[in-house]
Image (cartoon, grey):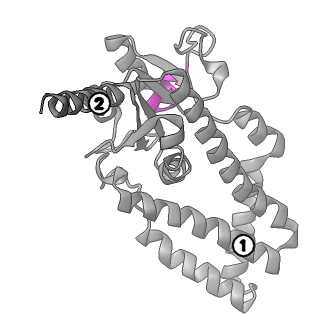
C-alpha cells in the first residue's frame, strides 16, 4: 500500500510539474480600428485577465528594440497605427511584459514594390463594372452573384455589432475563414475565365495570404520555443485566427505548448 501511495504521489507531482512547464499560447482575434464594442480598453482588459508574459504583435521586427519593446524613437506613430499596438504598449507599461514581432518580414515593402493594393482595387473595379454592364460570362456572373449574396452573411467582423468575445468563438472564426476563401476563389476563377490580364494579381492575393499565415505561424512557433514555460498572447486581425490556429494546433505535442481559448 505504501508503494502504491508513493507511486500515485509521484505521478501527481510529475503531472503538476509538467503542466507548470507547458507554454501556453492564446490567439486573440481583433479588428485594427476601434469600434463600439472592440477597442483598446476591451483588448487590455482581456490581456489583464490572461496575464501574458509575452505579447506577439502583427508587426515586422524593424519596429522593435532588442530588449522586447516598441522602437518608438524611430517609429513614434506605432501607437496610433492600430489599437492592438496601443493595447500591447499599455499592458506592457503596467506589467513589464515583453513585446515581440511575428509578421512576415518585408510585408510592407512587398506591398509597395508590387503595387499590391493598387492592382487589387483596379481588378475589383474592372470585374464589378463588367458585371454591371452585363459583360461577364454566364459562369462568372453566377460566381459574382453568389459571392455578393454570401458576403453579408459572413460579415462577422462588424465591430459595431459584435464583441471581442463573439469574434473569437470557433464558429465565427470558421465563418471568417470561409469568407476569405470564397473571395480568393471567386477572383481567381473569374480572372481565369474573363480577365486574363488580372490572373497574376488574383493569384498574388491568394498566395500572399497563404505566405503570410505560414510565416506568422512559424514565427509564433519560434517564440513559443524561446519563451518555454511562459504565457504568450498573439494579437491578430480576426481573419488570421483560424488559419494560425489550424497551422499551430498539430504542433502542440511535439513542440511543448498548449493553445488555449481566450474566452473559455
Q: Is residue 212 left or right of residue 199?
A: left
Residue drawn at x 70%, y 69% as measured from the top left: 187
Q: Which residue is mark 2?
A: 50
Q: Is any part of residue 47 visible from this angle?
A: no
Q: Which residue is mark 1?
A: 127
Q: Is residue 228 left or right of residue 35?
A: right
Snapshot quadrant of residue 147: bottom right
Considering the image in quadrants, where does the N terminus appear? top left
Snapshot quadrant of residue 181: bottom right
**At which x and y percent is residue 29?**
42, 44
**At which x and y percent is residue 158?**
38, 55
222, above or below 161, in the image = above
Q: Residues within 10 Å of mark 2 (few under 14, many from 20)?
A: some
Q: Which residues are magenta?
A: 77-85
Give the mark toward the camera: 2 or 1.
Answer: 2
Residue drawn at x 55%, y 8% as measured from the top left: 67
Magenta span: predominant SS is helix
Q: Is any part of residue 110 visible from this angle?
A: yes
Label whose residue precedes the other's in the sequence (2 or 1): 2
**Would residue 197 be counted in the magenta stretch?**
no
Residue drawn at x 46%, y 48% as measured from the top left: 238
Q: Are discs 2 and 1 less than 8 Å apart at CB?
A: no
In front here: 233 or 260? 260
Q: Element type at marker 1?
A: helix
**At which x and y percent is residue 60?**
64, 28
In front here: 131 or 7? 7
Q: Residues within 10 Å of mark 1 (few under 14, many from 20)?
A: many
Q: Element type at marker 2?
A: helix
Amino acid at each position: 500500500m505504501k508503494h502504491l501511495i508513493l507511486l500515485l504521489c509521484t505521478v501527481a507531482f510529475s503531472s503538476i510539474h509538467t503542466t507548470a512547464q507547458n507554454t501556453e499560447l492564446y490567439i486573440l482575434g481583433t479588428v485594427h480600428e476601434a469600434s463600439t464594442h472592440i477597442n483598446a480598453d476591451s483588448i487590455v482588459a482581456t490581456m489583464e485577465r490572461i496575464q501574458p508574459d509575452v505579447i506577439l504583435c502583427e508587426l515586422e521586427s524593424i519596429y522593435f528594440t532588442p530588449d522586447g519593446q516598441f522602437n518608438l524613437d524611430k517609429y513614434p506613430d506605432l501607437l496610433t497605427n492600430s489599437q492592438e499596438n496601443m493595447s500591447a504598449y499599455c499592458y506592457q507599461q503596467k506589467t513589464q511584459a515583453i513585446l515581440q514581432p511575428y509578421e512576415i518580414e518585408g510585408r510592407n515593402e512587398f506591398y509597395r514594390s508590387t503595387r499590391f493594393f493598387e492592382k487589387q482595387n483596379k481588378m475589383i473595379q474592372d470585374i464589378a463594372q463588367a458585371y454591371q454592364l452585363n459583360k461577364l460570362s454566364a459562369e462568372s456572373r453566377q460566381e459574382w452573384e453568389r459571392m455578393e449574396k454570401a458576403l453579408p452573411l459572413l460579415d462577422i467582423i462588424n465591430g459595431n455589432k459584435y464583441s471581442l468575445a463573439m469574434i473569437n468563438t470557433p464558429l465565427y472564426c470558421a465563418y471568417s475563414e470561409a469568407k476569405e476563401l470564397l473571395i480568393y476563389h471567386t477572383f481567381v476563377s473569374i480572372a481565369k475565365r474573363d480577365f486574363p490580364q488580372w490572373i497574376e494579381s488574383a493569384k498574388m492575393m491568394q498566395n500572399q495570404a497563404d505566405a503570410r499565415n505560414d510565416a506568422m505561424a512559424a514565427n509564433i512557433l519560434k517564440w513559443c520555443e524561446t519563451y518555454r514555460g511562459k504565457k504568450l498572447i498573439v494579437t491578430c486581425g480576426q481573419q488570421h485566427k483560424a488559419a494560425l490556429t489550424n497551422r499551430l494546433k498539430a504542433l502542440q505535442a511535439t513542440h511543448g505548448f498548449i493553445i488555449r481559448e481566450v474566452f473559455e
